[in-house]
Image: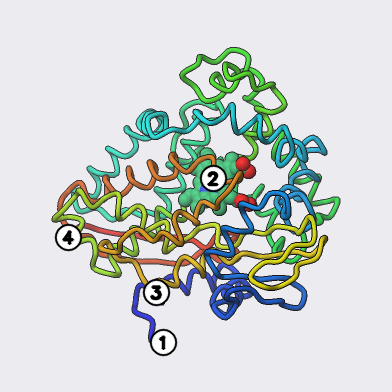
Amino acid sequence: MHPDAATRHEWRLLLAARPALAALLLGGRAAVPLRRVPRLGWVSADPLVAREVLTDHRSFTLLGEGGVGHLWAQVLGDWVYDLFDGAGHHDLRTRARDLFTEATAAALVRGAWSQRLAQAREALAAGETVDVADLARVLVGRMLASLLGLGDLDDDRARALFATGERLAATALGSAADTTLTPAAVAGAKAIVDDLTRGVPDAWAHAGPETLLGRCRALGLGLRETTGLSALLMVAGTETAASAMGRTVALLHDTGAQHRLLADPAALPDAVREGLRVTTPAPVIGRSVRRDVTVAGRRLRAGERIVLLTWTANTAPGGFDLDRPYLPENRQLWFGAGRHLCLGAPLARAELGALLEAVTAAGRPWTVVRRAPARRALVPTYRELSVRIA
Ligand code: HEM
């Protein structure tokens, strides 16, 4: 295969983030429907197998060794087990159903971003160089502050908040092979969570129902659940969202699809969907096998692990293409599937859409002036993506 320029740029991001991850995702193409790999356990890059595993809650869990629940229970406490996968999870998801709808997500983005995005639009229209990767981190930092009740932040404080969320997520670095944390990692992560959620008790008690934390209270979520959920939002919705934002702006440029989008702004939802598919910012999802089960003709045993290569499954149909129809097999596998399907999906889509709207607002194409990948990152992403409108 001779990858095109856009694909090569994406591969470089994977490689810079973690060479082992790039090898797994690219080499994992052969893991269809399912393969056994030494040290990793079962591996699959098949979208149908991935959905089967993610929706079979009786046979697979994220609480065991190899799942994020196991990871976070060490940081947040054993009550996480119930909140992540037990009856508490069902209750939380039922109550939280309306936390992020298309409408609330749009309102959150407007509230936290409109001023900063207007500034970026003006800078781009004036022909200034804008680092979209940095802009994405600033915007996501502002969103975090707004979700966590930490107020309105200037760019530097938004960057610092983003970096703190990133440090917390870094706790999970290397967890593809092992989710047992060292005592030092647990202590470090605990300190970060305490710091980041310091505004939660007050906002939970006093904030109005138009805020996320006020809504948590109104939905009947206790302070502990609200604090846990806040920590989760921070980890799940920080680097993933910023990564999709920078990379989709690059993909629109590298594939030339920006010209189509500029001529037809109604294609924006397609750009958002394709951007999420091709980047799949959470590139692997891990589960442990809860009970013996047969998948794609292979016998999986209780206690074993399975790694789903969602990036590999989502990119197999081909590169970024605004004309690509909806792919029923992949659906929205970039947000997972089943009971843990991304809670913030509407917010992530609204965030990406708002950034693309700002970048295309001038109606003229942009060029990439400079780009650099993030090295040793949990989520493959651009450290810098400086663009300019001619
Ligand atoms: C492009 C951006 C995003 C991507 C690709 C993404 C992807 C995912 C994926 C794949 C999962 C499932 C993990 C699993 O099954 O083990 C997940 C779960 C989750 N995401 Fe997202 N996410 C994004 C943005 C966000 C945002 C912005 C938020 C909220 C602010 C968020 C909050 C969550 C939460 C709370 C969960 C856990 C849900 C549960 O376990 O029930 N995510 N996300």
- Image depth: mark 4 or mark 2 in front: 2
The three-letter code of the residue at mark 1 reads: Met
Give the numbered dot on residue 96.
none
Q: In terms of image quadrants, where is residue 222?
A: top right
Q: Residue at x 44, y 69 (%)?
A: 315
Q: Quadrant of the C terminus?
A: bottom left
The answer to whether the residue bearing label 2 lies less than 8 angstroms from the nearest atom of ligand 1 is: yes
Q: Secondary structure at mark 2?
A: loop
Give the numbered dot on residue 390.
4
Q: Secondary structure at mark 1?
A: loop
| Percent of width and height locating residue 310 | 54, 63
Q: CA distance from mark 4 to mark 2?
A: 37 Å
Q: CA distance from mark 1 to mark 3?
A: 11 Å
Q: Is the residue marked by circle 2 packed among few (<14), some (14-19), or many (20+) residues within 10 Å?
A: some
Give the numbered dot on residue 1.
1
Is the residue 56 above or below the residue 215 in the image? below
Q: Quadrant of the N terminus?
A: bottom left
On the rendered structure, is 234 left or right of 223?
left
- Closer to the chain start, of discs 1 and 3, is 1
- Closer to the chain start, of discs 3 and 2, is 3
Q: Secondary structure at mark 4?
A: loop
Marks 1 and 3 in Cβ contact (< 8 Å): no
Q: CA distance from mark 2 to mark 1?
A: 33 Å
The three-letter code of the residue at mark 2 reads: Cys
